[in-house]
Image: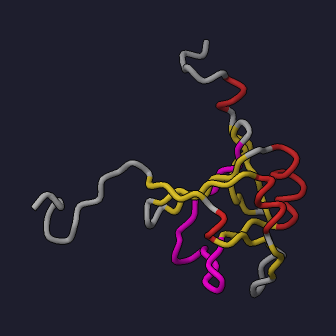
């Protein structure tokens, strides 16, 4: 019995892999990917990337939204899958598989809801 308010089929996560490594999950109509921004964000131009093969084989046909959570900054980046498909460009970095990159200006950015304390206190000075 599922006690959650979310229907069972929407709570199932399916691993998405590229070159034998898990790069994210299909969850309902969403592709979710957790990253460490300083290691995974493309610097020039600033963008988030997804394996080209995984995108066309798994993400595009199965999702409506893409969510990337930067565990380092606590920011969450969201975009429609069709926006990613229309505006992403192909890149090849080092020894990695071909990827598709979407510049940060195409993402809706949110925080993860956690309050981060300031350096000198809680910011309520």
**Residue drawn at x 64%, y 79% as measured from the top left:** 42
Q: Position of residue 34 (x, y in %)?
A: 58, 58
Instruction: Locate residue 93 relative to residue 86 in the image: left or right.
Output: left
Q: Position of residue 97 (x, y in %)?
A: 82, 75
Eyeballing the image, is 40 above or below 55?
below
Instruction: Report the coloring of the rendering.
Output: secondary structure
Q: Position of residue 52 (x, y in %)?
A: 84, 67
Residue with the most extreme top position: 1
Q: Quadrant of residue 103?
A: bottom right
**Residue drawn at x 60%, y 83% as measured from the top left:** 43
Work out whether residue 13 or residue 84 is closer to the camera in this orientation and state it. 84
Work out whether residue 106 or residue 21 is closer to the camera in this orientation and state it. 106
Q: Is residue 79 magenta?
A: no
Eyeballing the image, is 67 above or below 27?
below
Eyeballing the image, is 67 above or below 89?
above
Q: Quadrant of residue 85?
A: bottom right
Q: Quadrant of residue 111?
A: bottom left
Work out whether residue 63 or residue 72 is closer to the camera in this orientation and state it. 63
Residue with the most extreme front position: 105
Image quarter where the C terminus lies is bottom left
Residue with the most extreme left position: 125
The residue segment tinted magenta is: 30-47
Image quarter where the N terminus lies is top right
Work out whether residue 34 or residue 15 is closer to the camera in this orientation and state it. 34
């Amino acid at each position: 019995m599922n006690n959650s308010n979310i229907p069972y089929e929407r709570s199932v996560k399916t691993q998405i892999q590229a070159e034998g490594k898990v790069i994210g999950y299909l969850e309902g109509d969403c592709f979710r990917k957790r990253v460490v921004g300083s290691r995974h964000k493309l610097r020039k131009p600033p963008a988030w990337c997804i394996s080209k093969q995984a995108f066309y084989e798994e993400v595009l046909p199965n999702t409506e939204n893409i969510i990337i959570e930067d565990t380092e900054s606590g920011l969450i980046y969201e975009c429609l899958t069709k926006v990613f498909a229309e505006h992403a460009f192909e890149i090849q970095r080092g020894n990695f598989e071909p990827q598709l990159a979407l510049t940060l200006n195409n993402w809706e950015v949110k925080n993860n809801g956690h309050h981060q304390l300031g350096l000198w206190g809680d910011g309520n000075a």
